[in-house]
Image (spheres, helix red, strand yellow):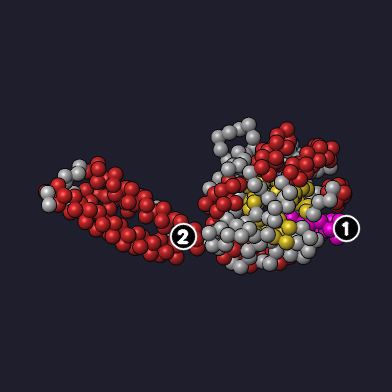
Amino acid sequence: MSELNNLRNRIEEINFSILELLSERGQIAKKIGQEKLKSGTDIYDPMREKEMLNRLLETNKGPYDDNVIKQLFKEIFKASTELQQSENEKHLLVSRKLKPEDTVVSFDNGAKIGDKEKIFVFGPCSVESYDQVDAVAQDLAAKGQKFIRGGAFKPRTSPYDFQGLGEEGLEILKEMNKKYGLNVVSEIVNPAHFEMADLYVDVFQIGARNMQNFELLKEAGRSNKPVLLKRGLSATIEEFIYAAEYIHSNGNSQIILCERGIRTYEKATRNTLDISAVPILKQGTHLPVLVDVTHSTGRKDIMLPVAKAALAVGADGVMAEVHPDPAVALSDAGQQMDLNEFDYFFNEIDKTRQLYL
Ligand code: PEP
Ligand code: MN
């Protein structure tokens, strides 16, 4: 056998040894990933990678120079991090890897969220009075709608702004449920309120400002009503998914996600609607996803095309705010649709909805 062949055979043996070591390394990395999951430790640890690299370079005898060794090991580290990430995702209860079928949230009035029949959640920003909510509820019922939204506990930026009617607001919403058969969606801001609110509300909303209020999430997880979880103002998609996992891991699998825009440098809209979050959430989780076109855009002039885009990228429904007299609204006066504007918006978006049936 020629020397070239000898050397090639030796190289091939080494390839197999490296492969065997890489496989063993991968198995250990997976176990480390499980330990990290148990202890809540971040998967990616740049400091530890740097230390490992430094130790390797100190013992590098050549012939590859330090940069080559660094590059090769960085690839190995990256492969391990990705392996840990995808393994850990499989363990998340909200993950599609664990449960491939869509979660469908069903209601006594026959409504379903997440079953391909796209739905709408409309209603005022805040509950202000019986007549104000009744005017919207009547309109929604006439349009064949199954949900109404309205805030009784308002998490306002300023403590001097209207904070909501509290339980009295929930009572008004419950009246609408009795009168028109609409499911009530309303925000809860205090973990101690779930029991009281259970009497009035069909869907507990957790607002953007509370997406990482873990005690609130845990309590929502212990409740037995669907939870509509909104994405935090500056939350990553991963953080959003983990927030949903808090609810699921505490026992409640009826979760509806809502993309409502995130904070960026852009000032043309109130928030930047992350439209790509919709298919990413649909791929990564089995939960229904809604898009709130009011709080994301903050602009009535673009709500309709944005709502159409939401349905086109696979959202299970759209949320928007409607008020009989937005000019005097106690919150979000600038962006709630009046009943005429809503009429046009509804007819158009309902036509789009029918395209997907
Ligand atoms: C709301 O839907 O009433 C609300 C306050 O929205 P967000 O939490 O998305 O700001
Ligand atoms: Mn609002």
Picture coordinates of residue 25 (x, y %)?
31, 60
Left or right: 24 in relation to 141:
left
Q: Nearer the viewer, residue 64 or 212?
A: 64
Q: Nearer the viewer, residue 294 or 118?
A: 118
The quadrant in which residue 43 appears is bottom left
Instruction: Reply above or below: 117 against 252.
Output: above
The quadrant in which residue 243 appears is bottom right
> Which numbered tag is attached to residue 88?
2
Instruction: Reply above or below: 344 against 91.
Output: above
Picture coordinates of residue 102 (x, y %)?
63, 58
Residue depicted at x 52% and y 52%:
238
Picture coordinates of residue 266 (x, y %)?
58, 33
Determine which residue is flagged by label 1: 179
Question: From this viewpoint, is residue 130 visible?
Answer: yes
Picture coordinates of residue 90 (x, y %)?
50, 61
Q: Which residues are magenta?
A: 174-191
Bin the neighbour count of mark 1 within 10 Å (Cα to Cα): few under 14, some 14-19, many 20 and up.
few
**Circle nearer the N terminus (2, 1):** 2
Which residue type does callout 2 highlight? Asn
> Which numbered tag is attached to residue 147?
none
Which residue type does callout 1 highlight? Lys
